[in-house]
Amino acid sequence: MKNIGITVLLFLTLLAMPVKGQQGPLLSRSYHSKLKKGTIRELLQTFIDESGIVVEYISNFLETDRVVSLTGNETTVSVFLQHVLQTQRVTVLEKNGKLILVPIKPPAGDQDAFASTYAIFGFIKEEGSKEPLINATIQEPLTGKGTLTNTFGYFTLSLPAGPHTLRISYVGYATRTIGITLNENSRTDISLSPGTPVPEIVVASGSRLKKYAAKNINAEQANQYPAGNELVGENDPIRSRNLLPGVISVQDYADGFLVRGGSPDQNQFLLDGNEVFNPTHLLGSLSIVNKTSFKSMLLHKSDFPSRFGGGLSSIMDVYTKDGNMEQWQGEANLGFLAASAAVEGPVRKNKTAVMFSFRRSLTTPAVRLLDEKFNARFYDVHFKITHLLNENNKLMLNVYTGHDRMKLQQSNSNNLQKWGNKLGSLNWNHLLGARSFMNTAFNVSHYNNLAGYQYPLYDDSSDVPVIISTFNTYSSISHYDVKTQFEVQPANNIRFNFGGKIAYTMIKPFSTNLSDGFIENVDDYNLVMTLPFKEYTLYYENEINIDNRLLIRPGVHFNHYRFRNFHFNSIQPRFFASYKLDDRQQLYAAYNKMTQYLHMVSNPFMGVNNMIWVPSTRLVKPEESTSMSLGYSLRNTTGVSLSAEAYWKKMNNLTSYIEGGNIFSNDNTWEQSILTGKGWSYGLEFQAEKKFLHWQIMCAYTLSWNWRQFNNLNNGRRFPFKYDRRHVLNITVAYKPRNNWSVSAVWNFSSGDAFTLPEKIYPDFDNGQHIVDPGDPLAAYRFIYHYSALNQFHTRPYQRLDAGTDYAVHTGKKVSHKLSAGVYNVLGTASSYNYDLQASLDGKFNISLSRNRLFNISPYISYTIIF
């Protein structure tokens, strides 16, 4: 009789199931229980008495004596019942003005009739635009099964046949609960509306095992601390990475950022899967990604999924908007630093969409140096078109171009710098079935860098420059690749990721002209050599979930490299594991081996932004690293999240510049000017965040040691890396008294950088042979530096305080305005030290040490209109 009753009840459930994707009015009602702790029977009875809603259930299928504690965040009937019943094998059905608790499957012994499992799959998108949402959470609370969307918004989840309730959430969006009935594989595309999210069931979200240790930041999260993103009024969502532990911003006169003891070239930047070789404006102060086109980013620094390769320290995986499929919308911004505009909308509704953004710097005094002349300008253009061939196939064409020009006049030298990127990519998303997905991409990336360094010789009697020579160099790199990735998930507890890539890279490393002035026309540089190389890549990894408490992800990345007659094979094992201690705490660990074939080398006395790319050769071997990390995370019911991580990294075949050598000469001896060595980096990272009422506070601290060792430097002894900053501390505070008004501040403190001061400097006219060659035009630009030890000095500690406020107002149904104001570098702290050499005709050299002030105390105001 019991089995017959269950069968009838399930049959009625299927007939009465509400329309897919909707939630009944009873479940949406507001409800706040006065009883904070009790048995399931007591909590359900109290609910019936207080709400007046009838709840029917069979007590045999409930642990009615199980004690449940409420968090106090249960504000609706749906959330209350999900919390009370989260460990029970029942789902909630609304019918005829009452709620029925229906068993998902019969007791043990009656499983055979319900043994089938089916997949629900599809895409999670933003309501009103159909923009795919990356890393959205889909969870079945009663079974505890769940998954995340991939970088294209796709998900698949296998569940037993029958009725289920799904809970879909994404940061900055209203959480949604839908009912489904599975009797076959079913596709369901789900939309989430932007807005204040429903309070989460902390236990359910906290119990989800980490699939990776990477930090995921979407547009909403990037704006939680606006002062951390603002650069003199220009909002840069990529700058939010600098608030994280283990990440060091390279101040002012360098490109990019540093991660866990690595150098700037060891951070691979991907824009919609396409590699960018210099993703910055203003020498690293601003990224090339306009906030109007930004969607989300993933920063991998602990674990590296097997599909990635080419960056020893980090992978920055950035994605931009596809374009609004349903309506036209736009945004325009005017600030001290730049003006920008963006528009997106459907060319053909729900079929084809475009996104276009443009930004250009303004000639204002916002960018300035004290006691030095500085002139900089930049622009970037981004265009993207997305076309749905059908429900299973999508094409995305992405085009970007950007350019910088900077001129810096110092007391004893002048610098000219011009650089830019041109990118193009075509992506094809293909849904193979209920449990498999494929993406194929064709990418083109081009970067060029033109540098001029003007060096005067002085007459001691008059202290006036009598000879002015200019050292001009031009280099470029072009990269082409095609890659395919597959994702197959036959069951919830196992996923396969595999694919491959073929890449071709062409480097024009240096073309040098010596003249009496700057040469800005690229056609005036003679091509001396090209350095092409090829890469062939295969990767594979498994993601295995064991008993919902342990997740492991073993994988391997194989790469074959060819440069002329030099061939190199690299097998790079990867491993990640996470273990759930309880519903609030997790441990995770990672092991990675990485290989990098591109080296960035520089002449430290050639001026600013003086780096060039060169390939790996028989003499300059590929850079390799082995890293391990162990982490702990805690998220409790009071809005507190904590994390701690220890890491260790060993690096081989790192490059350095030989003092007295000249890599910028027009010959094939550039390899002779490069040294290779090794390095170590290890440390601890801590992060704490607290959210309460209108406040949000985050603290990130890094304790680290970074070492380098080269046989021919420092007498073979190890020495501190230039960016060996022992302590780095970031404290951010945000206060939001109203939805349209926020105030935030960011304070950054870090130990000083290590640097070397030469005791003596003298020209090497004969390349160390003591033979003068008057016919060598570059001889006067070779120097020999004499010092007792490398990096024996440290600069003063650096600190900076930024503060800002945002105020928004709506003037129409679709029009809003935002005014942002603040002060960048409130304390007026100079950022970094810079060498400045002065030479005279009699061979004397003076060294002056100054601190760069690219941005002094800089108040700003900016205006944004969204329509």
Image (cartoon, helix red, strand yellow):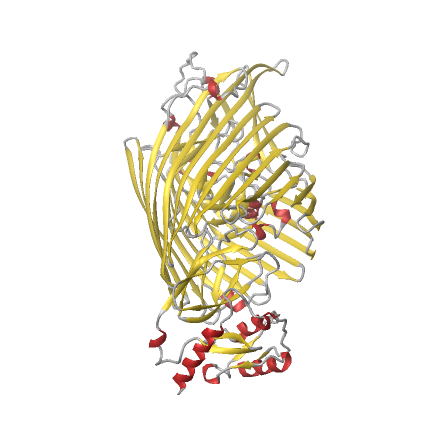
Q: Is residue 722 visible?
A: yes
The residue nearer to you, when weighing 523 against 864, is: 864
Which residue is rendered at x = 45% and y = 19% of the image? 525
Q: Where is residue 45 in the image (x, y as percent from the top left)?
A: 58, 83
Q: In this view, does 575 lie to the left or right of 347?
A: left
Residue 542: quadrant of the picture: bottom left
Q: Where is residue 366 in the image (x, y as percent from the top left)?
A: 67, 34
Q: Where is residue 689 in the image (x, y as percent from the top left)?
A: 58, 58
For the N terminus, the image quarter is bottom left
Q: In this view, does 123 lie to the left or right of 29?
A: left
Q: In this view, does 630 lie above or below 274?
A: below
Q: Is residue 667 above or below residue 856?
A: above
Q: In the displayed orientation, state which residue is furthest to the bottom.
A: 1
The residue nearer to you, when weighing 421 against 333, is: 333
Q: Can residue 718 be seen in this view?
A: no
Residue 506: quadrant of the picture: top left
How many numbered discs? 0
The residue nearer to you, when weighing 48 against 180, is: 180
Q: Position of residue 262 (x, y in %)?
A: 46, 43
Q: Is residue 224 above or below residue 664?
A: below
